[in-house]
Amino acid sequence: MELIRGLHNLKKQPGCVLTIGNFDGVHLGHQELLIKLVSKSKKMGLPSLVISFSVTPETFFGRPKARLSSFRDKHLFLKSLGVDKHLLVRFNKSFSEISAASFINQILVQKIGIKHCFIGDDFRFGKDRLGDFSMLKNASDENNFTIEKINSVLLDGRRVSSSGVRGLLSEGNFISAEKFLGRPFSISGKVAHGEKLGRTIGFPTANISIHRKLSPVLGVYSVLIQLKSKTYNGVCNVGKRPTLGGSKTLLEVFIFDFNKEIYGEYVTIIFKQKCREEEKFESFEALKKQIKKDVEKSRLFFQSNIS
């Protein structure tokens, strides 16, 4: 799959079948749309193109949300579904001021060469979000492209959405979140050097660089750790480590029965159970006692949930 960073790097093309959105988490609703996108592109003999944003509109307008997936993971999900091209647009002041009509005529028609478009039922575009399905439908007749609206996917009577997944994760409901996502919720990243305080109390942790100011999960969790071709059990903390005076959100994982150096390795943390909220303890010793309880709870969880 070709990654195109910015409209200015998009080469002239004969046409494409496209869709637009944040696609955070690439959940079941996204997957249904993307499968139809790829299928339609093959029937038309044109490349499939997904437009997403490096800075989301919500973040630009001061309403940031916790990301379900990193850019790397989102890109790999799109690739696995067979998408041909991924156009990454930086949502900034100038982009936010493009009118809906100009977005259609100058970007979709002239720049991108739209021939068919799939959009979700809640899609809005252009300055002040004035563009919608009906505007695109009217423009399609004049500019020789077709458009198709994809309705939301319902699961157990609930609309599958990124916000819905965030809500389930905040509740610690990983079973339902997995249903919405079509896979277990996970966070991936490289193991980085930390302060190495965990090893002083018998719990050496791997610090995962997650690069997120907001996390959809906060607290202590029983997790699976995928490293290369192997999977390990463990317990992780996602938070600011208040007992140690931390201010930055970090992910630290203690891998059971493991003593290898893995700095620089790429790992995937799969969340299975929430043990507790993160809290500030009176002393380092009190924290150590609680970590022992967290480890015992997680070991029991995995013993009773052997997969």
Image (cartoon, rainbow, N blue to C red):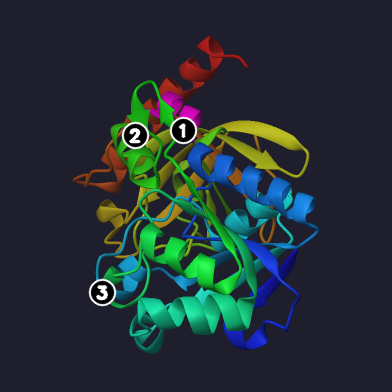
Prevailing secondary structure of the magenta residues: helix
Q: Nearer the viewer, residue 1 or 145?
A: 145
Crowding near pointer 3: few (<14 within 10 Å), some, many (20+)?
few
Q: Nearer the viewer, residue 125 or 73?
A: 125
Q: Earlier in the sequence, mark 2 or mark 1?
A: 2
In the rendered image of this protein, does residue 40 appear above or below residue 20?
A: above
Q: Which residue in the structure is indicated by mark 1?
A: 180
Q: Which residue in the structure is indicated by mark 2?
A: 168
Q: Which residue in the structure is indicated by mark 3?
A: 128
Quarter of the figure with the C terminus: top right
Quick check: 195 left or right of 188? left
Q: Amino acid at mark 1?
A: Phe
Quick check: 237 left or right of 167? right
| Most distant residue in the left direction | 282
Please report contact status of discs 2 and 1: CB closer than 8 Å, yes or no: yes
Magenta stretch encompasses residue 162: no
Quarter of the figure with the N terminus: bottom right
